[in-house]
Image: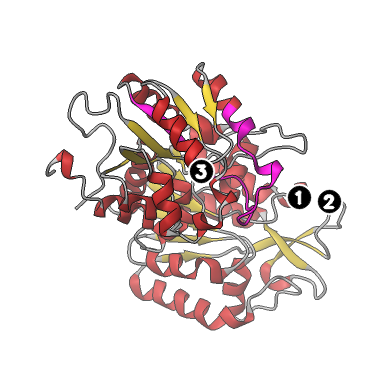
Amino acid sequence: MSVRFIDQVPEGFYEGKKVLMRVDFNVPMDDNGNITDDVRIRRVLKSINYLLDEKATIVIATHMGRPKGKVVAKYSLEPVARRLSRLLKKEVIFLDDCIGEEVEKTISAVSSGKVLMLENLRFYVGETENDPEFAKALASGIDIYVNNAFATAHRAHASVVGVTDYIPVCLGGFLMREELDYFARALKNPLRPLTAIIGGSKVSSKLLAIKNLLNSVDRIIVGGAMAFTFLKAQGFGLGKSVIEVDMVDQAKEIFEQAIARGVRFYLPVDCVAAPRIAPDAETKVVPVQEVPKDWMGLDIGPASATLFNEVIQDSKTIVWNGPMGVFEVPIFSRGTLGMVHNVASTYALTIVGGGDTDVAVHKAGEVDRISYISTGGGAFLELMEGKVLPAAEALENCCNESLGED
């Protein structure tokens, strides 16, 4: 079985049908409730417009923040509905709930070609608990389900997994297909050399990903605070740098496995060190084995950047997840932003995972020179770990009887 997508249906299939589309509109907002970045909304417009052209009625379902099953005003999706309306240049009917009799009546009454948006799914605890009754209520009156929320594809939530048990046709949207296709191009059938860049603070959070990557990549570059755990495994003294002591042995094991499999494993050779994390902290560039006793490494240094760039420029495919340092603080951002510029300047297929890496790419102004920027952080990482995403599995297992066989 495989996921079927929204353009893989018979002609006229959507006309007069009610389509529930799960998206991820968990966009950043300021203290006044203004959306500060609407990229996630823009990324699904193609799918919405496609279904509108096919004369479907679209019911948008998403979450915002973590209200933990309670109605929290600052997490209302009403501002998101307004922004979607502006981008579509079309009215978006906002409903102040996501399940219930009034919601069902409104969905039933609207004519083809309308767009509705449900209130925050996570105002109900049944969403995150994948409660069957909540999923059934969400599916009420719906003919077709479309999952276009890759960023939540690793969550076994009611609107991602459970709802597929109660809707006869379940499909993937265009964004979902883009995400899965690009990942397959990068790790299942890549142009080589294939280089993985892994950063961030903790080895433990990316241990499975690194282990799995050893089966497919030619080179691995490790930066960020997690690099110090690997360096500790090499016997270096690293001052007060962040080290996961309980992960040192596993880091050493990974390094040895890489050597045994012929995977070239690159670690920083120098770093930007400081006694504290602050914009006005004193800093110095030192070899990694010479970090002062009461200082810590907070960014890769210029020699590491040059070394990593040599590897990057000789790559045909690059997959990147995680920053090279504490890039949120300007004096520790040069390594990460420099890495963005270097990756963007290659002729390789470049795929960047969501989360902090996405933020860094935007901060560096290199969005247009990266082949693909994933909308998912956790979902992207789980694919790197070799896991099957719950969303993809649910779509594959949906019967789709009315569509016939592939």
Graded by Cα atoms within 10 Å as few (under 14), some (14 to 19) or many (20 or more), the crowding at tag 2 reads few
Which residue in the structure is indicated by mark 2? 279
Residue span colored magenta:
56-81
Labels 2 & 1 near each other (Cβ < 8 A)? yes
Give x and y (percent) for residue 201: 63, 64
Task: Report if residue 164 is visible in the image.
Answer: yes
Graded by Cα atoms within 10 Å as few (under 14), some (14 to 19) or many (20 or more), the crowding at tag 1 reads some
Q: If you read the primary sequence from the N terminus, does the residue marked by circle 2 or circle 3 appear first? A: 2
Labels 2 & 3 near each other (Cβ < 8 A)? no
What is the secondary structure assignment of the residue under circle 1? loop
Graded by Cα atoms within 10 Å as few (under 14), some (14 to 19) or many (20 or more), the crowding at tag 3 reads many
Which residue in the structure is indicated by mark 1? 329
Which residue occupies 42% across, 24% down? 110
Give the label, 3 or 1, closer to the camera: 1
What is the secondary structure assignment of the residue under circle 3? helix
Amino acid beneath label 3: Val
Give x and y (percent) for residue 406: 13, 43
Taking the image as shown, residue 157 lies to the left or right of residue 229, namely left
Q: Is residue 72 magenta?
A: yes
Taking the image as shown, residue 31 lies to the left or right of residue 8, namely right
Q: If you read the primary sequence from the N terminus, does the residue marked by circle 3 or circle 1 appear first? A: 1
Which residue occupies 19% across, 53% down? 1
Which residue in the structure is indicated by mark 3? 343
